[in-house]
Structure formats: C-alpha cells, structure tokens
Amino acid sequence: MPAAARAAQRMRLLTFALKRLGRLLLTVLLISTIIFFVIRVIPGDPALVIAGLDASPENVAAIRAKIGTDQPLTVQYIRWLASVVRFDFGTSLSTGQPVTQMIIERFPLTLSLALLGMVVALVLAIPLGIVSAVRRWSVWDYLGMLFSQVGMAVPGFWLGILLLLLLAVKVHWFPLFGSGTLKHLVLPAVALGFARAAVLLRLTRASMVEELSREYVVTARAKGLTERMVKYKHALKNALLPVVTVAGIQLGYMLGGAVIIEQVFSLPGLGRLFLTGVYQRDFPLIQGGIVFIALAFSLINFAVDILYSVLNPKIRIG
C-alpha cells in the first residue's frame, strides 16, 4: 500500500476514534445528569438517615449544610459535575471515605468476575455455534438451539442458587461463600456467563451459516480446497467478526449484571457496595457507582468499535 494511502487510512481511523470518543463523553454526561436529578426526587432525606430518627431539627439542618443538600439543585449539580470531571465522586455519607477509593478497591473483583464470565460464555458459545452451523438440522444443531433457549430463559440469580445447592452444599466441590481465590469465582462466573453464552451461540451459528453461503466459499470449494480449510480457515474468520463486537458489548452488560450475582454469592464487589448505598440513601456512592459503570461500559464499546474497524478493512470509516 502506498504511503499516501496508509496516511489517509490512519487519518480516517483517527477521525472515527475522535467521533466515537465524543459520543462516549456525551453519553456519560447525559447519564450523570439523569441520575443526579432522579436520585433527588426519590423520597427520603440522607441527612435524616445520617443523624437518626431522634435527631433534633438543628442537627439535621447542620448535616444538610455539611453535605450540601441545603443548596439549590442547580448549585448542587454544577458542583457535582465539576467533581466528576476530576474523577472525584465525593465522600460517602455512610462511611466518610472517598467514593472513588471505595470503587477502585471493589472494582478488581467485579472486573475479574465479568471477564471470567465472558470466558465461560465464549468457551460454550463458539464451539456449539460452529457445530450447529456446520451440521445444520442435525441432532447437534437441535441440541445447540435447545441450550440457547434454556440459557435465555433461565434467570442468572436462579441458576446461581441452583449451582450453590448442587455443587457447594451437596457435593462440596466449590466454596459456598467468600472470595480471594479463582475457585470462589467459578460458580458466579458460570451463572453470569450462561445467558450470554446463549446469545453468542445464536449469533455464531447465524453468522457462520451466512458465511458458508457466500460466493467466496463456493469458489474456494471449486478450487479444490478441503472442507476443513474452507470452513475453519476462511468462513470462520469472517463469521467471528460480529461475534467479537457483540461479545464486547455483552462484557459491558456483565459489569452491570454482576450486581445480582455478587449478592447471591456474597462477593464483596461493586454490586454489594452499590446496593448498600441504595439502602443507606448514600447519594454520592449511588451517583458515583452508576457513572463509573456507565463510563466502563462506554469505554468497552469504544474499544470494540476501534477493534472492529481494525479487524475488518471493509468497514467504511468516516
């Protein structure tokens, strides 16, 4: 490729990345604005929660002044937005710790759970999807579709409880609760990744079937290439491109979906932290948690968009 063409391609990629980055920032701004005002209309006074039901009106008023809830909403919003730009989500009303520090301490566990759940989903989905596509309308195809239907129908929290009863309570293969080792994350990851595996299986099958019907596959067979080379070297490589995109999006959803799974398995991740903030009416913790998850989700989508544009040279950027 000539140097001028390479430079033009890099410029188009840079323009594409900047546009996606602008959308990312706008999305996070919109979400932070919505969550700020929605939380304020929920009944309950955080100052009263901190002071206690028996506190005097003077003490409650002093706490409101201290945490800033006595100010007009516009003033509170401007201060909140200025802090978010500096990645400062304020101080937790219940613990007195910086919210950013609390999130950073819990995030590695939630991220590990989401990544392991994605590994489970891909290990289940891609082989089954390929077999279903290559052997259409066979017993393997029907079994794959049955797995997909069950995976999308079974709630993750119910599967988690079932796994605990069978593999932790009955046979003691895995620990019932706790964290700190890979063994503690296996059952939560299976419960989290099972439904995502069902979605990715259907996508892999559909994408593989579509690629096998394209003209280049017919041409490859006419040239005498073996079926294994046609299917697994040429068709599979193109079929996995949309799977990569959707898997990245599913990873973002898994960060949010880990909230319920962490509660089922008593994992001290972001999920339990945010639920505690909701119970205690901890505005800074709730706001910071949702904005952080939204930012992580947006960054994952941004990375997937860039990766897809690099992997697929046919995509039109710009």
Image (cartoon, rainbow, N blue to C red):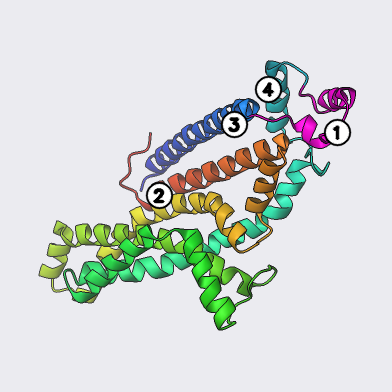
Left or right: where does residue 62 sit relative to residue 146? right
Between 22 and 283, which is closer to the camera in this rendering? 283
Q: Nearer the viewer, mark 2 or mark 1?
A: 1
Residue at 66% from the left image edge and 57% from the top image edge: 108
Q: Give the SS element for disc 4.
A: helix
Q: Position of residue 49 (x, y in %)?
A: 78, 35
Residue at point 61%, 64% (across, down): 265
Element type where label 1 sits in the image: loop
Residue at image coords 83%, 36%: 52
User: How far apart are the alpha carbons under marks 1 and 4?
Assistant: 30 Å
Position of 206 relative to 168 (above/below) = above
Q: For marks 3 and 4, give the CA distance.
A: 11 Å
In the displayed structure image, the side of residue 12 where residue 225 appears, left or right: left
Identify residue for label 4: 77
Q: Nearer the viewer, residue 50 or 1?
A: 50
- Earlier along the polypeptide chain: callout 4 or callout 2? 4
Residue, disc 1? 54
* Residue 56 pos. (x, y %): 88, 26
Task: Name the quarter where the C terminus is drawn.
Answer: top left
Give the magenta-colored segment's residue range: 43-69
The mark nearer the N terminus, 2 or 3, is: 3
Few, some or many residues within 10 Å of mark 4 (<14, 14–19, 20+): some
Amino acid carrying mark 4 in the image: Tyr
Earlier residue among tags 3 and 1: 3
Q: CA distance from mark 2 to mark 3?
A: 31 Å
Q: Secondary structure at mark 2?
A: helix
Tell me the CA gap for discs 2 and 1: 58 Å
Residue named by callout 3 = 35
Return the residue at label 2: 308
The earlier-in-sequence mark between 2 and 1 is 1
Which image quadrant for residue 37?
top right
